[in-house]
């Protein structure tokens, strides 16, 4: 096992070890293993075990449950990027006859397809997949519980359908496609559909006694794309690097960013918790930072992958117990410990390589009605619009090469900014999605809709 601990400060390493030690002891986990990623590589690993001298390392496999869904989502996005399907396509177009075909591929990815959370029949996680050989066995007679597209309702059968979609389009089994298109290119050689030694055994811990019960290790069959995979902290650390920055051999940075973008309407409780869902990824606002990733569980195992893209820190936590330690909280805490103890050092400020006078002319203070905004020109070639004080609509805008700009995020995402010039060529105002931004509040002659009172600004006489 390679040791990377020297890359973090001693105080940070101790704080990380203390956090997982508390989680293993208070959660009564037979074993718990964790890793932290920073700057694209593993910088810390730790493990705690109930067996003296036998703590697992970064090569020991654990079952990762629903983190499998993120891998399945990557395969679906690859099909989209190759032009083989569109996320807006109804499932019926590519996989007919399921009874749930009105849901779009994007809705299935975001758990908004209206499907049930679980498969009918015996508890699917503790029974062999051979009991559900066909999609109809996974979905049941009434697969839809909610109106399609209206509600985020987590669905394991939904990801079973996505796995079947991958198989239909690729003409090969889901796990074979995953190995060829994702695992091998990313070097995830210890991630597999079936356990490979060394691997942990799954345990149930008695809720009222310090006693153990072995859990069955079932092959999920048709439902494998929802939760089958086994992996290690070493492999999931590399997967976290990919989910933060992309890899053109698998998915571009733009596509993995799309996976991390909210795609589901949040339930009221989720709004309170600051949680939502993207395309195969969970998103949560916790402690002032946006965390993305996924949790997983199957009888005998718990797993969590947490990433803070802004902090450039990720954490992986795995345990071999059915319940106990709250790994989502542990993962968030590991990210927080590193981000706060050793905050990311920003890249040096650098000026523009060249200054375009027509672009520089746009910079400065603007008013939307009486709201004061600033428009800045960055070294990245983007415009940044935001209020001078307080909260409000913010956006970065990308040049279209013809003098116009397109918003990239927030309220102005996709909206067009058009500089409007006077007859003599001088800059009059900005039109942003029909909103007029002027150099002075309600500037006379600047084309403000509704006109400007000719008597101008005034006070109120006594």
Image (cartoon, helix red, strand yellow):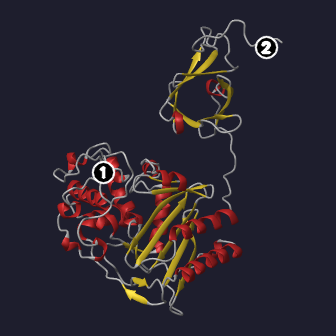
Residue that sits furthest to the top in the current view: 454
Q: Quadrant of residue 219?
A: bottom left
- Reading the image, the residue beneath label 1 is 79
Position of residue 46 relative to residue 80, above or below, is: below
Please tell me whether mark 2 sits on a helix, a strand or a loop.
Answer: loop
Q: Position of residue 61 (x, y in %)?
A: 41, 78
Q: Is residue 47 something that shows in the picture?
A: no
Q: Position of residue 97 (x, y in %)?
A: 16, 51
Q: Residues within 10 Å of mark 2 (few under 14, many from 20)?
A: few
Closer mark to the observer between disc 2 and disc 1:
2
Left/right placement of residue 270 relative to residue 443 reads left
Position of residue 46 relative to residue 440, above or below, is: below
Q: Residue placed at 38% from the left, 63% from the top?
A: 185
Position of residue 7 relative to residue 26, above or below, is: above
Position of residue 46 relative to residue 458, above or below, is: below
Q: CA distance from mark 2 to mark 1?
A: 65 Å
Left/right placement of residue 257 relative to residue 25 reads left
Q: Earlier in the sequence, mark 2 or mark 1?
A: 1
Q: Quadrant of the C terminus?
A: top right
Left/right placement of residue 352 relative to residue 54 reads right
Q: Residue placed at 55% from the left, 68% from the top?
A: 329
Q: Residue placed at 67% from the left, 17% from the top?
A: 442
Q: Quadrant of residue 193?
A: bottom left
- Reading the image, the residue beneath label 2 is 460
Q: Position of residue 349 (x, y in %)?
A: 69, 46
Q: Is residue 72 something that shows in the picture?
A: yes
180 vs 440, nearest the viewer? 440
């Amino acid at each position: 096992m390679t040791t990377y601990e020297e890359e973090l400060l001693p105080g940070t390493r101790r704080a990380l070890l203390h956090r997982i030690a508390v989680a293993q002891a208070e959660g009564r986990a037979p074993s718990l293993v964790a890793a932290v990623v920073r700057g694209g590589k593993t910088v810390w690993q730790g493990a705690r075990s109930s067996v003296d001298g036998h703590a697992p390392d970064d090569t020991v496999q654990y079952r990762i449950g629903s983190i499998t869904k993120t891998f399945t989502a990557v395969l679906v996005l690859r099909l989209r990027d190759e032009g083989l399907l569109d996320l807006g396509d109804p499932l019926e177009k590519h996989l007919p006859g399921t009874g749930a075909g009105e849901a779009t591929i994007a809705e299935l990815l975001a758990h908004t397809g209206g499907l049930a959370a679980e498969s009918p029949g015996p508890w699917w996680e503790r029974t062999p997949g051979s009991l559900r050989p066909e999609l109809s066995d996974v979905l049941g007679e009434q697969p839809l519980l909610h109106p399609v597209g209206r509600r985020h309702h987590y669905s394991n059968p939904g990801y079973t359908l996505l796995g079947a979609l991958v198989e239909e389009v690729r003409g090969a089994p889901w796990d074979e496609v995953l190995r060829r298109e994702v695992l091998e290119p990313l070097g995830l050689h210890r991630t597999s559909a079936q356990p490979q030694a060394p691997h942990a055994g799954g345990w149930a811990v008695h809720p009222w006694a310090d006693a153990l019960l072995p859990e069955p290790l079932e092959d999920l069959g048709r439902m494998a794309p929802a939760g089958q995979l086994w992996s290690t902290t070493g492999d999931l650390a590399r997967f976290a690097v990919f989910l933060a920055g992309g890899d053109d051999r698998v998915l571009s940075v733009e596509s993995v960013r799309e996976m991390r973008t909210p795609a589901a309407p949040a339930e009221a409780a989720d709004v309170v918790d600051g949680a939502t869902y993207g395309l195969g990824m969970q998103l949560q606002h916790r402690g002032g930072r946006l965390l993305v990733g996924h949790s997983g569980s199957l009888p005998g195992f718990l797993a969590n992958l947490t990433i803070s893209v802004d902090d450039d820190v990720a954490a992986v936590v795995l345990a071999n117990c059915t319940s106990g330690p709250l790994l989502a909280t542990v993962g968030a805490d590991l990210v927080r410990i590193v981000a706060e103890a050793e905050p990311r050092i920003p890249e040096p400020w650098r000026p523009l390589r060249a200054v375009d006078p027509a672009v520089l002319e746009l910079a400065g203070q603007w008013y939307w009605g009486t709201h004061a905004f600033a428009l800045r020109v960055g070294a990245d070639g983007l415009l940044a619009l935001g209020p001078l004080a307080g909260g409000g609509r913010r956006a970065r805008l990308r040049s279209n090469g013809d003098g116009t700009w397109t918003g990239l995020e927030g309220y102005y995402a996709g909206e067009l900014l058009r500089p409007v010039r006077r007859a003599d060529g001088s800059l009059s105002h900005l039109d942003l999605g029909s909103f007029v931004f002027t150099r002075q509040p309600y500037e006379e002659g600047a084309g403000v809709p509704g006109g400007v009172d000719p008597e101008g600004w005034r006070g109120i006489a006594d």
